[in-house]
Amino acid sequence: MSILGSTVSSAPSVATLEQLRVIKALRERRMFKLICGATYSDFNAVARYSEIFAKVGAHLIDICAHPTVVSAAREGILRSGVSTEKFPAIMVSLSLDHQQDPHFRRVVLNENSCDACGVCIPVCPTNAFSIKDAKLSYQKELCYGCGSCVSLCHVDALTPTPIQAFQPAILPELWSLGARALEIHVGPNFYWLEPYLSKIREISPEPWLISVCLGSGFSSYTELIEQAQEIHNILGDWALVQVDGKPMSGFARQDALMLQALSAAQAILTTNLPLFVQVSGGINDKIRPLLDQFELKVHGAGMGSFAKKLIEPYLNNLETATQIAQNLVMSIRPS
Ligand code: SF4
Ligand code: SF4
């Protein structure tokens, strides 16, 4: 069961119920992952998203590798009332190099430059901005670095800034709190992956379900395919690869952005390597017609910005939020 990383070391390959459910959905090409964001640490919202998406059958909830965030997700899943065999697996993200990784950024506000024009307020998918007492109020824990506010600011008061990613030493604690899946974001330093995985196995020998996220920064499809082959060499058959089209861009609902992710997935799938391929980055609810049109047999999809933008206004209206979430989870299922 190499998706659990057992070829990296002598890690046990016993899967938990949540992991088996993910693997089954991947095999059936309908795995749905909700992406809250590697830096998103609004505990109440994470609990609510987890509750809503557990109710509608999501398979993975991808969150920040912070113990309190993991506890919040677990609480939300328990609150959903679904039976344990239907629990989504909680996934946490680490990065080989957070300095160069767009998933590990937050915007820093320069209050001296900001004139409270308010232009950034409506574009933020998580409502991180508001006006209070004629000044811009910014809740940085709501920022997951999508970057959509940055270029709109006419005085350059918003600067994307790398934040410290969590280190593998946190993993045993996260496992004990209920996290069962681990995503490793690689970037230009792809060759660090194998030693990094070995280090993780030493520190945290628990049978994590491992996904490797290939960023959008590859220089050619040849390079992307070489990376996929290397992942197969390291993790073995049916390792999980996430192909990230344009990270955190889905709120725009642009098919062109989705096609970027699908083209990269197609490059890997045409190699016939025995890998699970999941797309993310710009994915929206119109994915299925495109997959069918291009006869693209991806195994799953992750939605982040698009899902957040749709659901965030209804976080306190469980019925409506659940209905929207249900449609999103269904949108990846084969017809
Ligand atoms: S767009 Fe820039 S100047 Fe306007 S409120 Fe936002 S941060 Fe301030
Ligand atoms: S728009 Fe994106 S980058 Fe800007 S504050 Fe909101 S989440 Fe952060």
Image: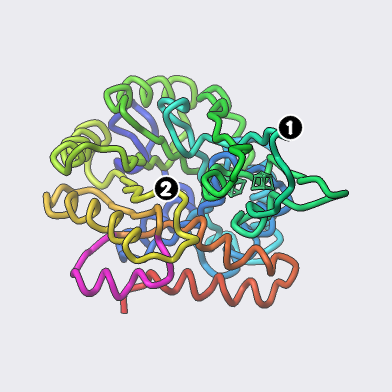
Q: Is residue 71 above or below residue 191?
A: below
Q: Earlier in the sequence, mark 2 or mark 1?
A: 1
Which secondary structure, mark 2?
loop
Q: Quadrant of the N terminus?
A: top left
- Asked if ligand 1 lies within 8 A of label 1, the reply is no
Q: Is residue 273 left or right of residue 308?
A: left
Residue type for callout 2:
Pro
Judge by depth and name the residue closer to the eye, 112 or 192: 112
Mark 1 lies on residue: 112
Q: Is residue 39 found inside the magenta-colored segment of the image? A: no
Q: Distance from label 2 to label 1 (Cα)?
A: 30 Å
Percent x, y of residue 179: 56, 42
Percent x, y of residue 102: 45, 37
Say the numbered circle drawn on residue 281. none
Q: Is residue 148 above or below residue 59?
A: above
Badge 1 local density, few (<14 within 10 Å), some, or many (20+)? few
Q: Is residue 269 left or right of residue 14?
A: left
Badge 2 local density, few (<14 within 10 Å), some, or many (20+)? many
Q: Quadrant of the C terminus?
A: bottom left
Mark 2 lies on residue: 247
Which secondary structure, mark 1?
loop
- Of circles 2 and 1, the one toward us is 1
Q: Is residue 287 found inside the magenta-colored segment of the image? A: yes
In the rendered structure, which segment of residues is drawn in magenta? 283-298
Residue type for callout 1:
Asn
Q: Is residue 105 left or right of residue 184?
A: right
Judge by depth and name the residue closer to the eye, 16 or 31: 31
Residue displayed at 79% across by 52% down: 131
